[in-house]
Amino acid sequence: MRFAIAVLPGDGIGPEVTQEAVRALERVGQRYGHTFDLSYAPVGGNAIDRYGTALPEETLQIARGADAVLFGAVGGPKWDDPKATVRPEDGILGLRRGLGLYANLRPVKIHPNLMYASPIKPQVLANVDLVVVRELTGGIYFGRPKRRWSTSRGRRGVDTMKYTEQEVRRILRVGFELARRRRKHLTSVDKANVLETSRLWREVAVEVAQEYPDVTLEHLLVDTAAMQLVRSPSRFDVIVTENLFGDILTDEAAVLAGSMGMLPSASLAGLPVGGKAGRRPKGLYEPIHGSAPDIVGQGKANPVAAILSAAFLLRYSLGLEQEAQAVEQAVDATLVQGHRTPDIAEEGRPVLSTREMGAAIIERIQ
Ligand code: NAD
């Protein structure tokens, strides 16, 4: 089969890890007889430097025309000026909006050989296998009014948390669908004791639950969820929540895995239905980490999250389940055999560079 992939490496370690993910895709292409037509495009800080915008129109067009988008990371100290009118993050926000990517999926699974890398006790980490589904295009990040102003009594600021029932319903459906394909337990996280948007969220969750009698729905307040995530993370199967809560909880969940370099993510315009011939939503696939300016150019970046993001791309946007599993198994075998980048290595043990770790994984893709 033939597929068009937009490759947006971005800034910092983005290009370093994305290169390994691309190599993994090329290996899959050779093994399974697929052709991936790759179109590279600028995004983030480097696009600001060259074009004055974090998301050039041409990049958005390339992303729109592709079957899927492979994304690295954006940002860095060079573009951190709080007074700047254009920001690297505008690139990712613009892509989400432009491609209608409203559902962010972040699975967290702890590799049994890597429990020492996590600050959480191994007995707490046993059997952790959860997915956070975060709403991505609504809530307080986008609600209006959103502004700052000065009064005679000092400076003021306002952000607005806003949701429509349609926005809430479609993301809850993604949560229920995913739970149905897994252990059939959905935790809906809100702050219904305080926020009106959360009361709406909870009401809609109860309504949507009628369509999924096989899935158990549980409501948790976000503060309790934050505590449970580190206290007993294995109790969760699928967590669904709004944009701001999801942003915070997903980073907390990432800590369980020990390193930011281990976890992939998918941002989708809905969940795929059916097999190879089914409906494929547009998707953007990226590691959960940022551009890691502290290690850029040193060959220290862990490419696992980027390579696992490529596996998600194969699964969700291209419908290539067997190929996705081949990549995931290659990562697993590499870790089982003790290969480590510095972020996940035990003290005093040998470490591989980004390129070497990528090569170790790629040669195991069967
Ligand atoms: P970060 O994720 O870039 O780094 C946090 C820590 O994790 C650093 O110590 C870093 O070295 C380490 N780390 C991250 N990825 C790693 C990898 N693959 N291998 C080994 N170690 C890794 O977060 P930050 O430092 O808060 O942000 C740096 C920049 O990235 C900022 O400009 C921020 O805005 C941006 N950012 C971008 C995205 C994105 O593109 N989606 C996400 C988060 C942060």
Image: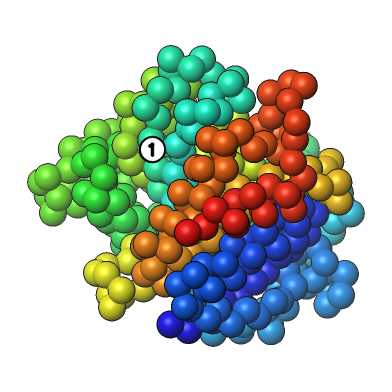
Quick check: 131 above or below 267? above
Q: Residue at x 75, y 61 (%)?
A: 15
Q: Quadrant of residue 157?
A: top right
Q: Amino acid at mark 1?
A: Leu
Instruction: Give the side of residue 283 with respect to residue 55, left or right.
Output: left
Q: Position of residue 156 (x, y in %)?
A: 70, 42
Q: Quadrant of residue 275?
A: bottom left
Quadrant where the N terminus sits is: bottom left
Q: Residues within 10 Å of mark 1 (few under 14, many from 20)?
A: many
- Quarter of the image where one finds residue 46: bottom right
Tell me how many marks there are.
1
Q: Is residue 146 left or right of residue 268?
A: right
Residue 362 location in percent, x, y? 60, 57
| Residue found at x 77% / y 45% | 353
Return the residue nearer the eye: 144 or 14.
14
Residue 293 in view in this figure:
no
The residue carrying mark 1 is 130
Residue 322 locus on image (x, y percent): 37, 62
Residue 316's x, y, as percent? Answer: 40, 64
Q: Considering the numbered disc 1 on the image, is that residue within a helix, a strand or a loop? A: strand
Residue 345 in sight from this viewpoint: yes
Depth check, front residue: 7 or 208: 7
Image position of 365 with respect to 91: above or below: above
Q: Residue at x 71, y 38 (%)?
A: 341
Does ligand 1 reach within 8 Å of label 1's beta carbon? no
51 to the left or right of 320: right
**Residue located at (45% from left, 72% from top):** 32
Colour scheme shown: rainbow
